[in-house]
Amino acid sequence: MTTPLPLPGSNDIDDHVAISRRFIDHARDELDRGNRLQASEKIWGAAAHALKAIAIQRGWNHSQHQNIQRIAIQLGNEFGRPDFETRVRLANAFHVNFYENVEEEDSIFKAISEMEEFVTDLEEVRLSDPRPFTVRNQSDKNRLQHLLGRGSNVEINQESLNGFVNRDHM
């Protein structure tokens, strides 16, 4: 059974979780029908919506494509999961495949399974407390400033015992 689609205009955490799960189901359905391009786009959508759910929870910006990657990288750093960056890059490669049509059916099938695992891992992160994080370099600082938004004051060597969360937004 396919997860129901939230109502138009819904944009809360549970909505993004539901959409992410729905896109995993749709990716499988589309691939079964031989529609590799739609299956590829649903792979990207599943990852993006799972990451958006966490971004909303933390008050992070999530409206730009690049921010989806930033969210995955930040969570990967915070939770000691460098595979998060690899997985979001994989999802993005299938987003590109929607336009370029270069991936074979077997690689799309494998990517669907990988994204299902990624979405499950992200659900565990979403249900966990943010982890301590120290801003180590300019890259960390830039990423957090993009996620936290205008007026955020992030400095190198700054640390947070409960992750960097935009409390003003929450």
Image: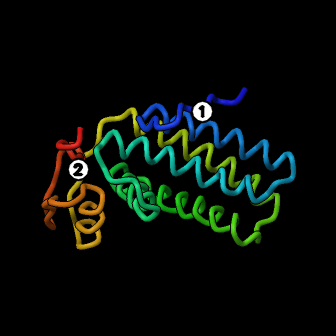
Q: Is residue 159 above or below residue 7?
A: below
Secondary structure of the residue carrying numbered label 2: loop
Which quadrant of the view contains residue 140?
bottom left
Q: Position of residue 90 (x, y in %)?
A: 60, 62
Left/right of residue 112 with respect to residue 53 in the rendered view: right
Q: Nearer the viewer, residue 149 or 21?
A: 149
Residue type, mark 1 in image: Leu
- Residue for badge 1: 5
Taking the spot 64% from the left edge, 52% from the top edge, the residue there is: 43
Callout 1–callout 2 Cβ contact below 8 Å: no
Q: Nearer the viewer, residue 13 or 141?
A: 13
- Residue for badge 2: 164
**Cα separation between marks 1 and 2:** 30 Å
Graded by Cα atoms within 10 Å as few (under 14), some (14 to 19) or many (20 or more), the crowding at tag 2 reads many
Taking the spot 37% from the left edge, 52% from the top edge, the residue there is: 75
Q: How is the image coloured?
A: rainbow
Q: Nearer the viewer, residue 79 or 3?
A: 3
